[in-house]
Image (cartoon, helix red, strand yellow):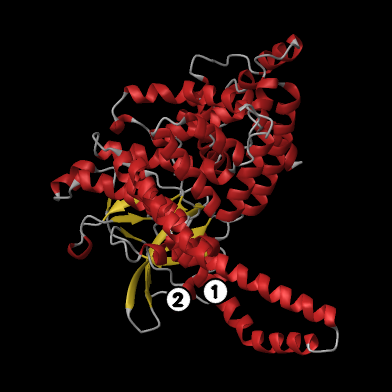
Amino acid sequence: MNRFFRGATIIWVALRYGLDELVLSNFDHPWLRLFTRLITIGRRLDAPRGQRLREALQQLGPIFVKFGQVLSTRRDLMPPDIADELALLQDRVPAFDPQIAIDTIERSFRRPLGELFVSFEREPVASASIAQVHFAVIRDRDGREREVAVKVLRPGMLPVIEKDLALMRMMAGWVEKLSADGRRLKPREVVAEFDMYLHDELDLMREASNAAQLRRNMEGLDLVLIPEVFWDFCRTDVMVMERMKGVPISQVDRLRAAGVDIPKLARDGVTIFFTQVFRDGFFHADMHPGNIQVSLDAATFGRYISLDFGIVGTLTEYDKEYLAQNFTAFFRRDYKRVAELHIESGWVPATTRVNELESAIRAVCEPYFDRPLKEISLGMVLMRLFQTSRRFHVEIQPQLVLLQKTLLNIEGLGRQLDPDLDLWSTAKPFLEKWMLEQMGPQRLWRELRDQAPHYAKVLPDLPRLMYDYLRRGAQPHHTELQELIATQKRTNRLLQAILYGGLGFVLGLLAMQVIVRVHLY
């Protein structure tokens, strides 16, 4: 019965805000349109469709607010006006009762709060759709008192999420059946992606591991601070990490008054992002201003502070190669190479004509070159490429969509700090270094080093294997002996070819580096 009333509430809110107009614009059953108007008499559809969708999600509650946030990242599926409006959703909802948070902590650790914390602030400092945060003080393993932030999941989230997700899947199926416009939005695919993100965020141990990995990766960069995770105080529904003290990056006037170099701050943000993407293949994928602060402490003055690690992106070597070559080909206006990369990736059918795809890519990319480089948005370029690819029946990989969304966030933040930021000048060294590592002697040496354990295991067995082989060859079988001699000669010739070919290969790699540098510059 509860599920029935929840479903009825969702449908009524959707109709009240005119969301049926989003998916039934080409539906040819007038009786359904008449029915929706009769049960929602007095509704006003003066506001833009994106605003109405955002307000409806806010009224439906925290889970739907989170759904709108995830939906806003799918700019490859959403019309721009809807994606822009959904991006305005704030990840802040009313806090739940602090006593419930305390009960959750005590239940998770099976110990009273006083035994876990030296002190605990009952009033939360932040509240989101999935969890809320309290400040506290713990005593670490060395006996030192440490200020921490305690993140606690909202109670009873999993049953509510499962019910709402079941209803979302059902409504997504209706949308696909009722409307061609709705089918183009791939609602079931979007709900499945939301399901994955939401369940990941419900496991705070996963978020803690993301934070720990990013902290290790960023240790030597000296541009960003990642909070330390205290594993003895982490559970699935509770996460305890170092308390970070900084100024929200959106408070630019305050940062400027404190003496922070704002243009450098903008460049540092881009450097951090491209380091995570092209060096580590593991990046913070939720870098909106609410999750970023700037340190004013003397020891770490001007460094970024990253928070909230529920969503991270990962890239394979293949993904990084695809991105680096696409960006490089784009800035060289080599649209044929961009088209070839799409086909080589397997995301566009092999039967696609290169010249047709090249023409479509040129049509969306060429207008950018009427602008200065500092006005070119790499995030928008990537989005346009995805949209063009969709016309050719390509399925874009989720990790690249996540990267495109994060790149848009970084660009928007960087240019908010410094309108003259030239993103390409900052990104270029990373692309250059990555391509050289992929095609230069560094890659040959790295692969030899990685294979060394295998070679070390095989080499001790070679003398015995050779002895057994020669012993068998010494038997009075003339044919086998001749074959052995012929094999030895072929082996000698192969070794010579490898020796000379290897020398030529290394020289060729060195020449390729020179060519790559010339093209990139």
Q: Secondary structure at mark 2?
A: helix
Comparing 335 with 81, the one in front is 335
Task: Residue under label 1, please give it.
Answer: 109
Direction from residue 256 to residue 30 in the image, left or right: right
Q: Secondary structure at mark 1?
A: helix
x 52%, y 68%: residue: 499
| Picture mark count | 2
Question: What amino acid does circle 2 point to?
Answer: Leu
Comparing 177 with 467, the one in front is 467
Question: What amino acid does circle 1 point to?
Answer: Phe
x 71%, y 38%: residue: 169
Direction from residue 521 to residue 102 in the image, left or right: right
Q: Where, by quadrant of the figure, is residue 61 drawn? A: top right
- Is 77 above or below relative to 216? above
Residue 211 point in image, percent of width and height: 45, 62
Q: Are marks 2 and 1 in contact (CB under 8 Å)?
A: yes
Tell me the tag on residue 116. Answer: 2
- Is 366 above or below relative to 62? above
For the N terminus, give its image quadrant.
top right
Q: Where, by quadrant of the figure, is residue 24 drawn? A: top right
Badge 2: residue crowd in 10 Å (few <14, some 14–19, many ≥20):
some
Residue 187 point in image, percent of width and height: 66, 33
- Is 276 above or below relative to 424? below
